[in-house]
Amino acid sequence: MTELRYLPDADDVVDFSATVTEVGDDGDYLILDGTYFYPEGGGQPADRGTLSWDGGSAEVVDVYKDHGEVRHDVEGVEGALPDVGDAVEGHVDEERRRAHRRMHTAQHVLSRVVLDEYGAGTAGNQIHADRSRIDFEPADFDDDDLARIERLANEAIAADYPVTKEERPRPQVEAETDEGRSLLHLIPDHVDPLRVVEIEGYDLCPCGGTHVDRLGEIGRIEITDRTSKGADTERIEFVLAEG
Ligand SMILES: [Zn+2]
């Protein structure tokens, strides 16, 4: 098992040391005893960055979970690959990480606004570094609704609420998560405790993604597009501007 060291609240760590536990047969991936690289999942893409060791280095081009391990796909290997048991230094691409943190927390704010104001849940989301989208249902927004959603979300960001991330026992999380705010039933029962992302006094959602520490770090949300995805599903696309 690879330890997910960015959990529960080390979202800001981009430099770390770890030990190699497996080297891909074709030298195409490395598995470590622990990692701060975020593996793709939950609508959030993987981190990128570099791994280096005594006598070599490589670019990390993809990161994903594989039966409890986290594989770091590597390319551009310089020198000989490390052996199992060797120490490596990891560096996560800070710009990409920061973009994903801002985007993912912005998604939580928008999901909260839409749940509170329109009673619509979040059916899916896809974060990218430069643009993101959320599917809401049941929903049927007009232009005025979009302007209102954007304004209310930016008001919450301007209030600069702190964001805390911690593990809590699953029964507690089930009790404190608002109906429609999370697809909790899709998280396997054995996942306990659950990592919770709480925007203090504003929103709470079980989530394993990387997030900012205060809403002010998001900047400004701009909703750029809306499309209907079926009878009662609406897709909103958004970008972020620096605050
Ligand atoms: Zn999330």
Image (spheres, helix red, strand yellow):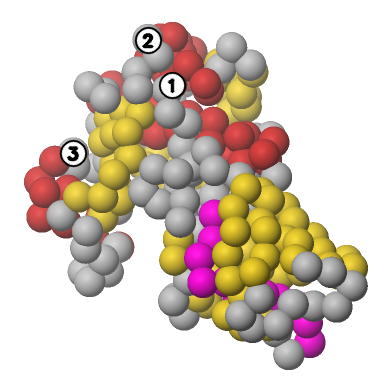
Q: Establish if 35 lies above or below 101.
A: below
Q: Quadrant of residue 93?
A: top right
Q: Are marks 1 and 2 in contact (CB under 8 Å)?
A: yes
Q: Which residue is mark 3?
A: 178
Looking at numbered disc 3 in the image, what kind of residue is underneath it?
Asp
Looking at numbered disc 2 in the image, what kind of residue is underneath it?
Ala
Q: Position of residue 76 (x, y in %)?
A: 88, 66
Q: CA separation, marks 3 and 1? A: 20 Å
Q: Earlier in the sequence, mark 3 or mark 2?
A: 2
Q: Which residue is mark 1?
A: 215
Is label 3 in a helix, a strand or a loop?
A: loop
Q: Residues within 10 Å of mark 1 (few under 14, many from 20)?
A: many
Q: Establish if 73 lies above or below 239.
A: below
Looking at numbered disc 1 in the image, what kind of residue is underneath it?
Leu
Magenta residues, as a range?
Answer: 26-36
Q: Quadrant of residue 160?
A: top left
Q: Which residue is mark 2?
A: 159
Q: CA separation, marks 1 and 2? A: 8 Å
Establish whether ligand 1 lies closer than 8 Å to the Cβ of label 1: no
Left or right for 194, reference 40: left
x 46%, y 37%: residue = 211
Establish whether ligand 1 lies closer than 8 Å to the Cβ of label 2: no
Q: Nearer the viewer, residue 95 or 182?
A: 95
Q: Are marks 3 and 1 in contact (CB under 8 Å)?
A: no
Q: Quadrant of the N terminus?
A: bottom left
Is label 1 in a helix, a strand or a loop?
A: helix
